[in-house]
Image (cartoon, helix red, strand yellow):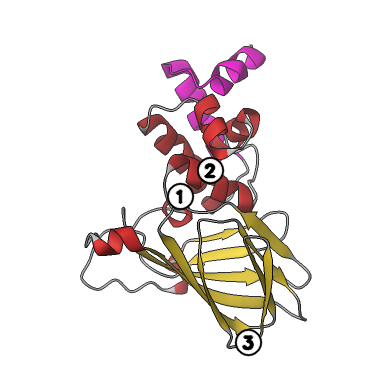
Amino acid sequence: MMNSHSQHSDDGERGSVVDEIDDGMVTGEAGQIESRVSRRIRELRRDRGMTLQTLAEKAGVSKSMISKVERGEASPSAATVARLAAGLGVTISSLLGEHDRHDVLLLRRADQAAFVDPETGFERRSMSPIFPSRGLDLVQVTVPQGATAGPFVGHRYGVEEYLVVVEGRLGVTVGGVNHVLQTGDAIFYQAHVAHQYANLGEGPAVALVVIGDIRDLREGRD
């Protein structure tokens, strides 16, 4: 019976029985952030009327993996989360949750949404408020010693990234070209091509990344 239910879930078919089974499985052993990501992926996919197969084709992630992620049975890597976000047409930060709008919003460290790659320990921390259709996003990335994060799929055309290294020595690969940055160095790049980070020094490498969609900014979208 469980195999039958799992097959229905993988096919992305809708139904009260499948929904109840999925809801019960998401919490599982996944941590708070992983559970939030799993829930958001499932909600966004269904809101868009997408089956698991459709999202799999758009994101380049297997249908079975997406099913496991949505049910909290698998912890996705940072690269997989990036692919799923691209397939859903949203930012990675938006998968971590959203904040209520205020004129002033103070984000204590405990309130900042952070995702840790279960394979590499790479951490992506959202330092800016997460609002729908926001044109700017400030992110802190931390790459453990000896680790590589990515490659991350390119964003949609019009997305740009500004990165500054605040600690350590970081290799940034953009479109197949490698760049070595020391503490205090900065780099700007069009982010519609694949990119990845590699820690080339001792200790953690930490960088701040400003992600902006120039189309949203030109249109005056917040």
Q: Which residue is mark 1?
A: 95
**Which is more toward the observer, 110 or 11?**
11
Magenta residue span: 1-28
Is residue 91 left or right of 193 when viewed as pictured?
left
Task: Say which amino acid is labelled 3.
Answer: Thr
The quadrant of the image that shows the N terminus is top right
Q: Amino acid at mark 1?
A: Leu
Earlier in the chain: of badge 3 and badge 1, it is: 1
Disc 3 and disc 1 in contact, CB within 8 angstroms: no
Classify 184 as above or below 118: below
> Can you identify the residue that label 3 sits on?
183
- Of residues 142 and 17, the one drawn nearer to the viewer in this rendering: 142
Q: Secondary structure at mark 2?
A: helix
* Proximity of marks 2 and 3: CB atoms separated by less than 8 Å: no
At x 72%, y 63%, the residue is 148
Q: Residue at x 55, y 50 (%)?
A: 82
Q: Quick check: can you spot residue 222?
A: no
- Label annotation for residue 84: 2
What residue lies at 24% left-to-right and 59% top-to-bottom? 221
Find residue 53 and report its image quarter.
Answer: top right
Q: Are marks 2 and 1 in contact (CB under 8 Å)?
A: yes
Earlier residue among tags 2 and 3: 2
Magenta span has 14? yes
Task: Check disc 2: other Cα within 10 Å, few if <14, some if 14-19, many if 20+.
Answer: many
Q: Main secondary structure of the magenta part?
A: helix
Which is more foreground, mark 2 or mark 1?
2
Identify residue type, mark 2: Leu
